[in-house]
Amino acid sequence: MIVIKLGGSLSQAETLLSCLNRIEQHYKDQAVVIVPGGGAFADQVRLAQVRWQFDDTTAHRMAILAMQQMALLIHGLKNQFTIVHSSTDILKRIKQGEALIWSPMIDELDKASVPASWDMTSDSLAAWLAKTVSAQALILVKSAIIDNKLTLEQLAEQQIIDQGFCQLVATATFTVNIISQHDF
C-alpha cells in the first residue's frame, strides 16, 4: 500500500486535478490511499485563530475538518475514488483495489493521542496513517520546489514539511519521498 499526501496548496496551484489524474493512471494496479492537505480551508483556520485567539486543540479540530473538505473536493473531481474515515476502513477496503481518500475522523486521532498543534499538520497525519496501516511507501506531493539534497530536518526548517514529521518517520519501516508537483 502507498499513502500519497497531496498538499492542499495544489488546489491553488491549479495542479490538483493533474495529480489526481496521475494517481489514477500510474497507480491503478496498486493499493493507494490519498491524504488531502487542508489547503485554503486550513489557511482560514490559521487566520481565524489569529483573529479570535482560540486554543490549538480547537484549531487542530478545525484543520481536520479542512482536510475533510478537501477529501470531498477530491471525491467531487474523482467520484470513482472512495472516501474512507478511519484506518480500520482503509484496511478493510484496500483489498478491493480501490483508490481511497482518507477523510480523517477527530475521534480516531484523539484516541491515538495525536498532538493538537500546528507542528502536526497533514504531512505528519499522513506519516501517522502510513505507520498505522503498515504502508510500504509515503509520498508527499508539494507545490514547492524540492531540493533532493536537503534532509528532512532542513525541509522542516524551510517549512516545506511540518516540525512533527521528522520525529514520526524517524523509525518508519516505509520509504518516504517528498516531491514537487512537477516531478510527480
Image (cartoon, rainbow, N blue to C red):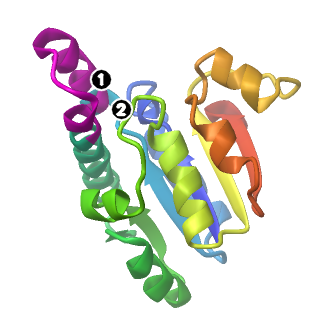
Q: Residues within 10 Å of mark 2 (few under 14, many from 20)?
A: many
Secondary element type, mark 2: helix
**111 lies left or right of 17:** left
On-image quarter of the C terminus: top right
- Range covered by the magenta-colored residues: 42-60
Rounded to the nearest angstrom, the CA distance separating label 1 from label 2 is 6 Å
Counting from the top left corner in percent of width and height, residue 65 is at 22, 46
On-image quarter of the N terminus: bottom right
Magenta: main secondary structure: helix
Q: Residues within 10 Å of mark 1 (few under 14, many from 20)?
A: some
**Is residue 165 visible to us here?**
yes
Counting from the top left corner in percent of width and height, residue 44 is at 22, 23
**Can you tell which mark lies on residue 39?**
2
Is residue 58 a member of the stretch shown in magenta?
yes
The answer to whether the residues at label 1 and label 2 have Cβ atoms under 8 Å apart is: yes
Q: Nearer the viewer, residue 52 or 97?
A: 52
Is residue 13 a member of the stretch shown in magenta?
no
Q: Which residue type carries mark 2?
A: Gly
- The residue pinned by badge 1 equals 43
In terms of image quadrants, where is residue 14? top left
In terms of image quadrants, where is residue 79? bottom left
Question: Residue at horizontal 15%, vertical 23%?
Answer: 54
Counting from the top left corner in percent of width and height, residue 38 is at 35, 38
Residue 183's place in the image compared with 95, above or below, is above
Secondary element type, mark 1: helix
**87 lies left or right of 22:** left
